[in-house]
Image: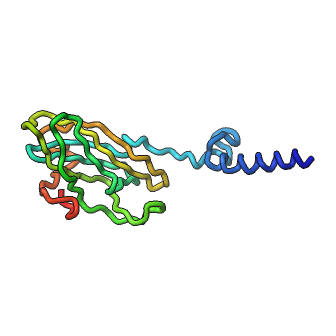
Amino acid sequence: MNTALASLLVLLFVATPVAARGEFPVGGGKGSTFNNSAQREFLPADEAFRASAWRDDERLYVGFLNAEDYYLHRHQFALDSRDAGVSFGELAIPPGEPMVHASLGEIEVFYDQVVFSAPIEASDAATGPLAITVTFQGCSDRGLCYPPEQVELDSLHGSPPAAFDSPPRDTGNSENGAP
């Protein structure tokens, strides 16, 4: 009897946290009181954070449009070139909105949209699109934080997309927050 009781208690202690995290089905269909409210619908990262890139002769610009109630972490942006002979200088990122994050402490975040830039450092005059990889990380206000994500973009020479009315053209550094 002691073995059966001990086994039942172990099963209970293991199953309860797993059920709470939604790792196995508990209860019936949609009307069940155990319907997995922990598995709320979250957007895929590429829908929550839509990225665009463009450039002029001297700078590369990256803009993000965030879905409602989603935000990006300022300290997680990174930019890499996928074109040989092209690199980028220091990122110029505007100041974000201050936030106290549950696990990260005091950080700056961007709701709605953000545009940051970097000087283009090319061994030859780069005239066509530049292939880039952008690293970013964001969260939902409803509690989900995505792992750091990467998106590959081609930055075309010319004007920004209409969603980014006019990107800042200042060539300041990221410490000043001026793109």
Q: Position of residue 63 (x, y in %)?
A: 25, 48
Q: Residue at x 14, y 45 (%)?
A: 120
Q: Residue at x 43, y 65 (%)?
A: 105
Say left or right for 25 vs 107.
right
Q: Quadrant of residue 69?
A: bottom left
Quarter of the picture containing the C terminus is bottom left
Q: Quadrant of residue 130?
A: top left
Q: Residue at x 25, y 42 (%)?
A: 80
Say left or right for 165 vs 16.
left
Q: Is residue 91 above or below residue 97?
A: above
- The residue lying toward the viewer, choosing from 43 and 4, is 4
Q: Residue at x 35, y 46 (%)?
A: 49
Q: Position of residue 86 (x, y in %)?
A: 16, 39
Q: How many marks?
A: 0
Say left or right for 163 vs 31.
left
Q: Position of residue 177 (x, y in %)?
A: 22, 61
- Of all residues, the one furthest to the right in this rendering is 1
Q: Position of residue 66 (x, y in %)?
A: 34, 49
- The residue lying toward the viewer, choosing from 115 and 58, is 58
- The residue lying toward the viewer, choosing from 40 and 53, is 53
Q: Please name the colour scheme applied to the rendered image.
A: rainbow
